[in-house]
Structures are given as structure tokens and as C-alpha cells.
Image (cartoon, rainbow, N blue to C red):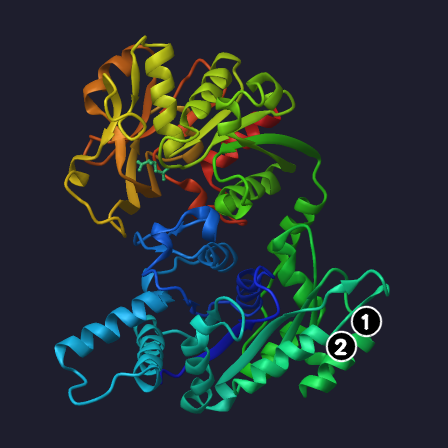
Amino acid sequence: MHPAKWIIVTGGVLSGLGKGTAAAAIGLLIKNNLKIVTVKCDGYLNVDPGTMNPIEHGEVFVLEDGGEVDMDFGHYERFLNTNCKFEWNLTSGKIFNSVIEKERKGEFLGKTIQIYPHVVDEIKKRFNEIAEKEKADIMLIEIGGTIGDIENAWFTEAVRQLKKDVGPDNIIYVHLTYVPFLHSVGEPKTKPAQRDIALLREKGIQPNIIIARSKEMLLKKHKEKIALFCDIDEECVISGRDIDTIYEIPLMFKKEGMVELLVKKLDVKATNLSEWELLVEKIKNPEQVVKVAICGKYTELKDSYASIIEALAHAGAHLGAKVSLKWIETTDIEERKISIEEALKDVRGVIIPGGFGTRGAEGKIEMIRYAREKNIPFLGLCFGLQLAVVEFARNVCGLDANSEEVDEKTSNPVIAILPEQIGIDKKGGTMRLGSYTARLKEGTLVQNLYKSNLAVERHRHRYEVNPKYHDVLQKNGLVFSGISENRRLVEFIEFPKNKFHAATQAHPEFKSRLLNPSPLFYGFVSACMN
Ligand code: GLN
């Protein structure tokens, strides 16, 4: 095995405790100049989450290389300030695919193909290949779901076996567990955590560090109890209480003594977090609050828009503002359950995020019209740009227009399928994905914000502004502030009559970082503040 230090993060009791942010925070504490490679193992049989409805699984995160991956990669990138790769997201789908392919080729001729050794070995082989290829100093591996899930069994077994392969001094196991607060007795109860860790040990994994998630900080006596029953030192039980901003997690872990544990066990150094600490202070003590609306159709699960929420927080941190969010389900606008005036009466800006399909689209178009006519700052992202173009074509250019995606038979398809997408019938991983460069137009709002003639952002779409309508849109006052390098595809638009009416075909939220906020989000939040 490649000579890296290996950190394995597992979780139990419940999902949704924040294993991804905990793993990312651990990485940040010891990052310095080390090459940390983050691997996420997801038990499901999808090859990647790209085909899942965000309401099922949260946001589909898009990488530079176009990989559609689990949203935890967003946390890894934002905390560790790195760009991850598609191969680093292992799913049961990917693993089984390659084992079965090898079986068909005859690579295991004569053998019965089994979960152990074939599937488990394939997983370990992938770990090692990634470590070698990336020359990793630290391999930070997170197992999705909770210990004991059937679909994660092979990943759990693979990380258990790693201890022998890499040597016990080169690996630590961190387990995230849960300590509920029982109101009837007025105290936290450690029994679920004890049972959870017993299950982990039954799988052959003895944790080195336990992070006990709970509502409040745990007292010494609770830590003692967990330590005793789980056979570790009390200082190895780290309290992780609920907090307002995820960016405080590394600081909380640090206060709890996590850095010393990592330094001692892995022979690494502590990261200097002073700039991070300063920004967290700014997040916790904002000078003002600005409320903005996110208008979509996956609003019942806020995780669907995770990167947008974070990009707003980053911009807010640098501008001294807390961005509070109002969620508007655009089908409610369509069904007249609420009027636009009512929905937007207390907000300072409107975001139309990425999306797919017909449901909710007309509601979004109406919201964009309202924002444009009332000069309310508007930011459109991907589908948001496409619907802003439809709105402009209809209400300014006077065309009976739509996107082909929303209405196949529209008489003016101002948004049309990308030519290279015609004839593609496979849905998995086939959109225009990943990083593309746009040339920005001199003197535009967008160019001003990017402070450059180029903007490189990530993409995930099948449709584009139809070139046949470029002229009429521009003649009527829509400015194409960014165009793809081949000069065909509209990457950014703006309507200069308003103080901020801008949209992009890209998803700049994926590249926003706490220390380096997205220029477009920065401009939008700033416009909402003035
Ligand atoms: N549905 C649109 C397209 O495929 C927009 C996609 C998105 O918002 N990510 O082009």
C-alpha cells in the first residue's frame, strides 16, 4: 500500500449527523501543505448520484473534471480548498460494475466471484491506486450511511482490513456517534452511542477517536462513560455540539483537543487557522442581516441547494452580512397559493437556482419578471439563466417564447437543446459537465466582479440560449456579458438597466470557498445590501 497516513471516518446511530463536515474539518486541522485526498464511499448501486432527484439525496455536486458526486465533496473542497476528482467517489455501483466486467472478461477464470475477496479487494485496490496516483500524504476516507447498513458492509470490511495493510501506526479510525438529550430526565443519554460503538467493534473496528454529536457540549461524566464502555481514553471522546455555522466545527474540535490527538497519532502538524478564525468571527457577528429568496422546486430539502447556501455565507462573511434565506416553492406561485408580492415583500434579492423540467418553471419566470420590473437584485444560475432569457424574450422582445425543455412545441424556442446533446439517450453522466471558460465582455458588471476577461466555472446542463435568438435578445437590451471560448454559447447575461440583474449558465456556487468567495455571489449579496 502507498505510504500515506490513513484517516477513516465512520458514523452511527443516525445519518445526517454531519460526517462529511466532520471529515472535512479534521482534514483542515492538519492540512498545512499536505496533499490530502478525500475519498467518499457510498453504498448505493447508482454509479454516481447524477441521476438522483436532489430531494432523495441532496445536491449533486459537480467537480472540475465534470464528475457528479456526493454533496460531501462540496464540504471537502470548501474546507480543504482543493479540487477533488470523480474517481474519489466510490459507489457500490462503480465497484460492482468493474468486478462484473472483469468476471466477464475472464480475469477470475475458474473462481466463484464473491463479496469477499473480490469486491473488498477491488475497493482496497481503488484506495491504493488513488493514493499512488495522487501521491497522497493523507488519505481521508469517509464511509457513507451508518455502521451496520447492508449496503456499506463491503466498504466497512475494506477499511477494517486496511489496518493490517498499512500498519497500525499509519491509520486512525474516527467514529461519529450521537448522544440524544432526553427532556423527560433532563440529561443526555449515552446508551445509543454505546450500542453503536459496540456494533462498530463487532465489525472489527476499534475507534481511536469518537466524536459525540449532541445538542450541548458533553460533560466529563458523559465522556467518561463512553470512554469506559468503548475502551478508549476519555480525551479521545470529542464533543461536537450543534452550532450555527459549519465553519466553526474545526474550531470546536480544536478546543476539544482533536489537534493534539491527530498530531500524536499521525505525526502531522497543526494548521494555522487564524484567517479562518477571523472569518468565523465575522459570520458570528454580522453587521447586518439581508434576506434573500431562493425560488425552486426542491425547497423541502435544503440540502438540495447546499452549495448556494454556502456561497451566500462566504460572500456574506466578507461583506459583514448574514444572509438569511426565504424558501419559495415556485409551484405555490403557479397554483396561486401565495402572490409574488406577498412572497417577496420582505426580501432584498431573488435567486433562481438550477433545475430541470416543467414543474415550477412558470412560477420562476413570473418571479424573474417581478424582480426585473421592480429592480430587485436577481441572480440566475443555469436554469435560472435560461428562464431569465425566456422571461426577457416574452416580456421585453414580445415573443411567444419558451425553453424546449419546458415546452417542446413552443413557437420560439429561445432555449434549445445543445447540438452535441441531440441523440444522446443515456442519462448518466452525459450532460455538458465540468469546468469551461467564458470570455467576459469589457465594461460589464460580470467582468467587473471577476476582475478578469475570463471566468472559469463548472457546468451541468443540456440546453443553451438558442443562437437564432442572440440578435433579437441583444437588440432589446440584454447584454451577453460572457460567451464560451468557441463564441457560441451564452455563459453570462445581464440587464444593465437594473442594479443587479445577472445570470450564468454555470454553477459558480460549486467553486465558492470561505477564504475565496464566488465573485458573482459577492456582487449579488453586495447589491442586496446597498
Ligand atoms: N435543465 C437545464 C438544462 O439541462 C438546466 C440545468 C441546471 O440548472 N443545472 O440545461
Residue 198 is situated, as x and y percent measured from the top left of the image, at 62, 83
| Residue 497: numbered disc | none
Picture layout, residue 477 above or below residue 450: above
Residue 161 visible: yes
The residue that label 2 is drawn on is: 223
Q: Horizontal placement of 85 versus 56: left or right?
A: left
**Label 1 close to label 2 by CB (< 8 Å):** yes
Type of amino acid under label 2: Lys
Provide the residue designation for mark 1. 219
The C terminus is located in which quarter? top right
Q: Is mark 1 within 8 Å of ligand 1?
A: no
Looking at this view, is 4 or 213 the one in front?
213
Calculate the distance from the C-alpha at mark 1 to the C-alpha at mark 2. Answer: 7 Å
SS class, disc 1: loop
Q: In this view, does 453 lie to the left or right of 496?
A: left
Along the viewing direction, whichever of 71 and 137 lies nearer the viewer: 71
Element under label 2?
helix
Which residue corresponds to the image point at 70% horizontal and 46% vertical from the top-left? 284
Q: Which amino acid does label 1 sit on?
A: Leu
